[in-house]
């Protein structure tokens, strides 16, 4: 008889949520973690970066106090040590909360580095845990550019950026996905000179093209230099005591860049090595564990979730994947994962958030598309909070069914929840536009964009 019904390998967001859900379903669960529960999101990702971004937003507002009819605040700047202390307090509070939830739900926390020791077996040091079901949630790490390893001082990852002891005077950020644009945004608000380099033709290339264009306009207005369609020539990188020099190629042009720090943000690589996948026979494709819509691997009883499986490497997606895996293991019949219904959120300024298909993706998928767009500048609350740039775009099928919702502007990461609910409920643009949105609120932009799909927007 197995020691546990479920053993989860990795205590990040997906892993600890899976373990708690298993306990809720009456299963005997163990969670194996070699470091601190909470994983990348809590300790090196979502939470600490958003603490920094919140400080950057507040500093931006303080510096423009006069726009709100307030006396300007002289000398407002970053207290780097104070910011680090605030990050530590918040992370520590949430970490203790996760440990409490595990204990409250009766999940056994096994400290140490775990690895599969064959199907249904997980080895942690000298101890072997047997389980009816195993969930791999080993997460990811920042990806290096080929030929350009991190040194932690001049060539850094997002992990290193969170540990900087002072504000850099200048930064080159390579990679304009979510991580890259967030750090570019916060470093610019903190007073650094920032250059953003992206190999593909636009910023945030996984977002709707109109959103990418609007973000680049906003960034360049803030003084962030944006070099798209640009490739870093790795052999050109020279790191020394004075900073970093590098060359990027744009078409036939070569551009020389200099900065105090080079931040590489070109994605994350799954942690799939040294965790016993070969021993158990678990299939890996292109660096990620292969799973189906219920997070089942090719080995019966073995599941995988989160960054280790690729796809949308987002904490809230990992948590949902963990729930689907556990409920499947428990004999329930959850719906398979539908990533077109998972919201994405990026906390740069202006914020970017989306769910579902972009307009181009919808057309390429064969839909007959109608789209409606409404600007924040026509929303009273946006002017009140002093953030009028950006818009909401609703992508719909010819019958009005919502295929995607895209936001760039104030509090977009909060507003996208309504779009996610709409996608989950297979809602229509008519429903989005007809539901009464309170006034004056930023949420009105969603209602107006829903109406705009049929050309019925009121306030533009």
Image (spheres, helix red, strand yellow):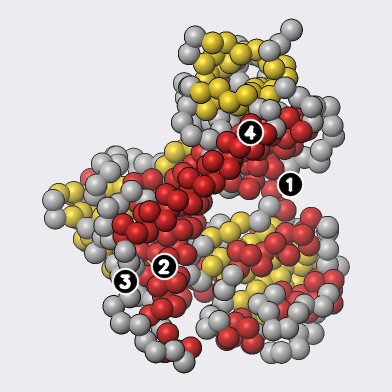
**Between disc 3 and disc 4, whose residue precedes?**
3
Which callout, 1 or 2, points to the residue nearer the camera?
A: 2
The Cα atoms of the two marked residues, 2 and 3, are separated by 10 Å
In the picture, measured across the screen, residue 336 lies left or right of residue 276, that is right
Q: Which residue is mark 1?
A: 338
User: Residue at image x 33%, y 75%?
Assistant: 76
**Between disc 2 and disc 4, whose residue precedes?**
2
Q: Residues within 10 Å of mark 4 (few under 14, many from 20)?
A: many
* Front position in the image: 37 or 198: 37
**Between disc 3 and disc 1, whose residue precedes?**
3
Residue 112: assigned label:
none
Q: Which residue is mark 4?
A: 102
Q: Residues within 10 Å of mark 2 (few under 14, many from 20)?
A: many
The answer to whether marks 3 and 1 mark residues whose Cβ atoms lie closer than 8 Å is no
Secondary structure beneath dot 3 equals loop
The answer to whether marks 2 and 4 mark residues whose Cβ atoms lie closer than 8 Å is no
Q: Residues within 10 Å of mark 1 (few under 14, many from 20)?
A: few
The Cα atoms of the two marked residues, 1 and 2, are separated by 34 Å
User: Residue at image x 72%, y 59%?
Assistant: 420
Q: Which residue is mark 3?
A: 77
Q: Which residue is mark 2?
A: 56
In the picture, measured across the screen, residue 94 lies left or right of residue 197, that is right
């Amino acid at each position: 008889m197995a020691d546990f019904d479920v053993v989860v390998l990795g205590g990040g967001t997906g892993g600890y949520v899976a373990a708690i859900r298993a306990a809720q379903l009456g299963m005997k669960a163990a969670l194996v973690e070699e470091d601190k529960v909470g994983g990348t999101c809590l300790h090196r990702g979502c939470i600490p970066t958003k603490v920094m971004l919140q400080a950057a937003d507040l500093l931006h507002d303080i510096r423009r106090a006069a726009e709100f009819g307030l006396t300007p605040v002289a000398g407002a700047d970053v207290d780097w040590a104070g910011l680090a202390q605030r990050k530590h307090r918040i992370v520590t509070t949430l970490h203790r909360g996760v440990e409490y939830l595990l204990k409250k739900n009766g999940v056994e926390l096994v400290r140490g580095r775990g690895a599969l020791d064959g199907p249904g077996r997980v080895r942690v040091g000298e101890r072997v845990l047997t389980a009816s079901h195993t969930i791999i949630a080993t997460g990811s790490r920042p990806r290096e550019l080929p030929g350009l390893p991190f040194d932690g001082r001049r060539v850094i990852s997002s992990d290193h950026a969170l540990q900087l002891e002072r504000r850099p005077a200048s930064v080159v950020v390579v990679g304009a996905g979510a991580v890259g644009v967030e750090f570019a945004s916060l470093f610019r608000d903190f007073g650094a000179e920032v250059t953003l380099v992206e190999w593909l033709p636009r910023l945030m290339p996984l977002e709707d093209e109109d959103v990418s264009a609007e973000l680049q306009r906003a960034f360049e207005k803030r003084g962030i230099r944006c070099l798209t369609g640009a490739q870093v020539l790795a052999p050109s990188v020279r790191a020394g005591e004075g900073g970093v020099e590098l060359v990027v190629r744009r078409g036939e042009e070569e551009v020389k860049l200099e900065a105090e720090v080079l931040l590489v943000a070109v994605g994350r690589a799954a942690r799939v090595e040294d965790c016993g996948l070969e021993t158990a026979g678990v299939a890996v494709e292109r660096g990620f564990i292969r799973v189906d819509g219920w997070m089942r691997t090719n080995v019966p009883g073995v599941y995988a979730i989160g960054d280790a499986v690729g796809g949308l490497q987002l904490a809230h997606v990992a948590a949902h994947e963990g729930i689907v895996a556990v409920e499947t293991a428990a004999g329930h019949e959850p719906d398979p994962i539908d990533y077109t219904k998972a919201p994405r959120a990026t906390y740069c300024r202006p914020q970017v958030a989306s769910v579902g298909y972009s307009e181009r993706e919808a057309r390429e998928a064969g839909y007959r598309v109608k789209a409606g767009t409404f600007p924040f500048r026509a929303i009273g609350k946006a002017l009140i909070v002093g953030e009028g740039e950006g818009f909401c775009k609703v992508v719909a099928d010819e019958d009005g069914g919502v295929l995607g919702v895209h936001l760039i502007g104030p509090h977009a990461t909060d507003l996208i929840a309504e779009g996610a609910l709409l996608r989950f409920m297979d809602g229509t643009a008519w429903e989005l536009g007809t539901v009464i949105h309170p006034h004056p609120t930023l949420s009105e932009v969603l209602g107006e964009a829903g109406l705009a799909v049929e050309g019925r927007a009121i306030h533009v």
